[in-house]
Image (spheres, rainbow, N blue to C red):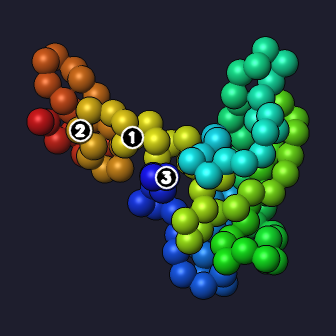
Amino acid sequence: MIEIPEYIPKGTREEIEEQLKSWVGKKVKRGPTWDWGNQDIDGNRNKVEGTITEIPEHGFTTKNCGCVKVVWDNCHSNTYRIGNGFADVILVEEISIKNSNDPICCGQKMDWINMAYKCSKCWRVK
Ligand SMILES: [Zn+2]
């Protein structure tokens, strides 16, 4: 079964496109429904990250999903499916927070200082 991250939007195509507007400028990498070959691979056969540059309206007219335009760090660019079960790309930052065991405060990982977790924004200690 394909695991789609919680934050991938669902709804009508218009609702998804509206939510995706806040994703412009964010870094992404290949997601669980990737079906686009080597577009995110560099000359050393490594996967690269990309940046969302715009949200094209009705990019995939035959699919009930939204669409993001991505420029990859290997200079390739294309549009990819997002929403209603499609996650051709996923956000790099959300992934690193979710995979980490460090506690979260004020929307960021707490720092490990002097044997305790501290938040660098509100200075809460855990
Ligand atoms: Zn905090």
In the picture of the structure, the residue carrying the numbered disc 1 is: 97
Q: Secondary structure at mark 3?
A: loop
Say what amino acid the circle numbered 3 marks: Ile
In the picture of the structure, the residue carrying the numbered disc 3 is: 2
Residue that appears at 78% across and 39% down: 37
User: Residue 60 at what x, y percent from top left?
Assistant: 79, 71
Mark 2: is the Cβ under 8 angstroms from ligand 1? no
Which label is found at residue 103?
2
Say what amino acid the circle numbered 2 marks: Pro
Which quadrant holds residue 39? top right
Residue that appears at 50% across and 42% down: 93
Q: Earlier in the sequence, mark 3 or mark 2?
A: 3
Counting every numbered tag in the picture gives 3
**Dot in front, 1 or 3:** 3
Q: Secondary structure at mark 1?
A: helix
Which label is found at residue 71?
none
In which quadrant will I find the C terminus?
Answer: top left
